[in-house]
Image: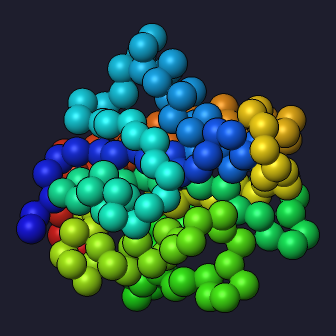
Amino acid sequence: MEPVARTAVIGIGNEFRRDDGVGWAVVAALEDRAARQPLSRGTVLERSDGDPGRLIGLWEDTALAVVVDACFPPSAQPGRTHRWSGNPDGSFHPAGPARHSTHGLGLAEAVRLGDVLGRGPGRLVVYAVEGVDRSLGTGLTPAVARAVPVLVRRIEADIRRDGEARAHGPRDG
C-alpha cells in the first residue's frame, strides 16, 4: 500500500519507570511546541507501550514514522542519543537475547513484522536515548531530561526535511 502524506512521531515507554519514559516526554514536549507553533500538516503525536501490534497500527500508511525510545546498555552514558534511519539494505536487525529493552518483543521485531505484513512506514527514523534508571517512579534523570529539548529540535528538522523532500518529489541524478 502506498503511504499517505502523513507523519507519526511515536514515543515508546512507560512514564512510571523513570528514564523509560523519555519517549513519552519527547511527545509531551512536541505537543507543547505544537500548541505555540504547529508542526507540519498531517503530523500526529502518539504514545505507545511498545506492543508490536499497536506500533504497527500507529505507523502503517505513514510517509514518515519517527520513534523515540529509551535504551539501557551496560555502560550507559545517560542522555546520549543514537539516531537510526536504516541500514544500507534497509533492514533493522533485532538486538538478540542480550537486548536492552524493557519490552518483551522489541522495536526491531515490530519493524520486521510490519514489513512482512506490508504495514511498515514509508520511512522510519529511530532515536534511542541511553537511560540509567528504570526503577519505579516518575521523572527523568537530569541527563536524560536535558536530551529532550535537543531531540525535539532534531525531530522537527526530520519532519521538515521529509516534507520538503516529498514536496519536491524524486529527483533525477
Instruction: Judge whether residue 150 can be spotted in this image.
Output: no
**Could you tell whether 136 is left or right of 159 in the image?**
right
**Could you tell whether 150 is left or right of 139 in the image?**
left
Colour scheme: rainbow
Relative depth, front residue between 114 and 150: 114
Q: Which residue is drawn at 62% across and 82% down?
A: 95
Relative depth, front residue between 88 and 104: 104
**Could you tell whether 96 is left or right of 79 in the image?**
left
Q: Which residue is drawn at 57% across and 27% down?
A: 29
Extreme right residue here? Answer: 75
Extreme left residue here? Answer: 1
Viewport quadrant of the N terminus: bottom left
Identify the image quadrant of residue 140. top right
Relative depth, front residue between 141 and 89: 141
Q: Which residue is drawn at 80% across and 70% down?
A: 73
Query: Residue 120, image x and y in percent?
Result: 27, 68
Residue 83 against residue 148 in the figure, above or below: below
Q: Residue at x 72, y 84 (%)?
A: 98
Query: Residue 21, image x and y in percent?
Result: 65, 43
Viewport quadrant of the C terminus: bottom left
Extreme top residue here? Answer: 36
